[in-house]
Image: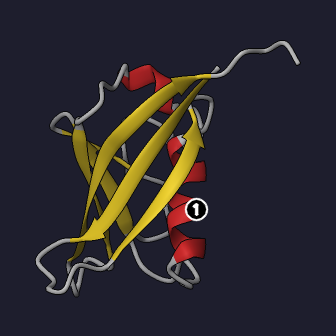
Amino acid sequence: MKVYFIKIALHGVSPMIWRRLCVPGTASLAMLHNCIQIINGWDDDHLNQFRIFGKDYGVYHSGGISFNDDARTVYIDDFKFDIGDKFSYEYNFFMHMMHDIRIENIKELSSTG
């Protein structure tokens, strides 16, 4: 199983505000969204989306925008990320809280103990 070490930084803020996460490749985008909500102390009160390789992904909220793919069935491993790859996460479309997400490292974990 692959584990992705990612850095999430609030875009355009100085000094930099960032968090680091270790995320299994089997994690869905919905799970990553939930992790970002938790580490920032948010309650999922605002619309949000990921932009990965030029395509938008997100969890549908009533009255919000819809997505072609269900974020609960799109997994980190699906993107075949390399170290250094970047994508974005926007939270709160009114405030445009943009986050830059970068793959810092990828480790292959052995399934044997």
Image quadrant in which the C terminus is located:
top right
Viewer-closest of 107 and 1: 107
Q: Amino acid at mark 1?
A: Cys
Residue 67 at x, y percent in the picture:
37, 45
Dot 1 crowding, Cα within 10 Å, few <14, some 14–19, many 20+: some
Viewer-closest of 48 and 10: 10
In the drawing, does residue 60 fall left or right of residue 89?
A: right
Asked whether residue 48 appears in the rendered view, the answer is yes
Looking at the image, residue 49 lies above or below residue 102: below
In the drawing, does residue 73 fall left or right of residue 20?
A: right
Q: Which residue is mark 1?
A: 35
Residue 10 at x, y percent in the picture:
26, 74
Viewer-closest of 112 and 45: 112
- Determine whether the residue tagged by mark 1 lies in a helix, strand or loop: helix
Residue 78 at x, y percent in the picture:
44, 21
- Residue 104, quarter of picture: top left
Image quadrant in which the N terminus is located:
top right
Residue 76 at x, y percent in the picture:
48, 32
Q: Residue at x 36, y 56 (%)?
A: 7
Looking at the image, residue 7 lies above or below residue 77: below
Asked whether residue 74 appears in the rendered view, the answer is no
Q: Residue at x 57, y 43 (%)?
A: 23
For the image, the number of numbered tags is 1
Residue at the farthest front position: 113
In the drawing, does residue 54 fall left or right of residue 24?
A: left
